[in-house]
C-alpha cells in the first residue's frame, strides 16, 4: 500500500491480524494516491458485549475529510465490516475526485444541446 495508513485498534482482537486485514482492504484506496493525503482506520468494540466490531475509515483529501462508517448488522464479521466501510470510502472518493478534478473524471464532458 502506497498511502499513509494509521490504524487504531480498541478491540480485544489481535493487533497483527487486524493490521493485515486493514492493509489488504486499504489497497483499494491506492488508485486515489494523488488525491488522498491521509487514511485513518479506527476499530472499536460495541458497548454491548458480543456485538459486531465498529469500523470507521477517515480519508483526508486536501481540506476535506471523508468519513465512512460501517453500519453493523447483528453478528457481522470483522471482514464484512471492513469491506463495507472501505467500499463506502471508495465510492465517496470517486465522488470527491469528480468534484475536485472534473477534467480527469470526464464530468466536464457534456453533450451540447442541439435544437
Image: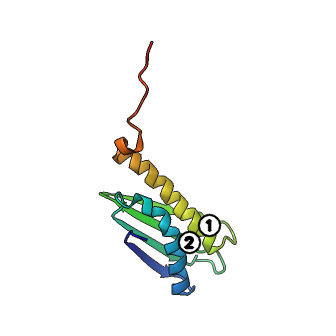
**Residue bearing the label numbered 1:** 72
In this rendering, does residue 70 appear at all? no
Coordinates of residue 27 in the picture (x, y in percent): 48, 67
Residue closer to the observer: 11 or 36: 36
Along the line of sight, the residue nearer the viewer: 60 or 3: 3
Label 1 secondary element: loop
Q: Quadrant of the N terminus?
A: bottom left
Q: Residue at x 44, y 48 (%)?
A: 95
Give the percent coordinates (x, y) of residue 98: 40, 45
User: As drawn, is 84 to the left or to the right of 26?
Assistant: right
Which quarter of the rendering shows the C terminus? top left
Q: Which residue is mark 2?
A: 54
Q: What colouring style does the render use?
A: rainbow
- Binning the other alpha carbons within 10 Å of mark 2 as few (below 14), some (14 to 19) or many (20 upward) gives many
Vertical placement of 11 versus 69: above or below? below
Q: In the current view of this chain or complex, which residue is farthest to the right?
A: 75
**Toward the viewer: 112 or 88?**
112
Are circles 1 and 2 on residues that touch, CB within 8 Å? yes
Image coords of residue 8 (percent x, y): 45, 78
**Residue placed most toward the observer, 7 or 3:** 3
Image point 38% across, 68% down: which residue? 3
The disc, 1 or 2, on the residue closer to the chain's N-terminal end is 2
The structure residue drawn at horizontal position 49% and vertical position 81%, both measured from the top left corner, is: 9
Give residue 14's quadrant in the image. Answer: bottom right
Where, by quadrant of the figure, is residue 87 drawn? bottom right
Residue 26, percent from left and from top: 48, 68
Q: Please tell me whether mark 2 sits on a helix, a strand or a loop.
A: strand
Q: CA distance from mark 1 to mark 2?
A: 7 Å
Amino acid at each position: 500500500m502506497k498511502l499513509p495508513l494509521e490504524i487504531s485498534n480498541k478491540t480485544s482482537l489481535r493487533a497483527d491480524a487486524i493490521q493485515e486485514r486493514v492493509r489488504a482492504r486499504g489497497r483499494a484506496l491506492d488508485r486515489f494516491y494523488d488525491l488522498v493525503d491521509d487514511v485513518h482506520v479506527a476499530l472499536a468494540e460495541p458497548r454491548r458485549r458480543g456485538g459486531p466490531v465498529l469500523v470507521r475509515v477517515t480519508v483526508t483529501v486536501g481540506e476535506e475529510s471523508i468519513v465512512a462508517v460501517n453500519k453493523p448488522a447483528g453478528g457481522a464479521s470483522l471482514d464484512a465490516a471492513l469491506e463495507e466501510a472501505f467500499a463506502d470510502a471508495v465510492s465517496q472518493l470517486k465522488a470527491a475526485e469528480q468534484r475536485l478534478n472534473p477534467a480527469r473524471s470526464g464530468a466536464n464532458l457534456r453533450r451540447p444541446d442541439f435544437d
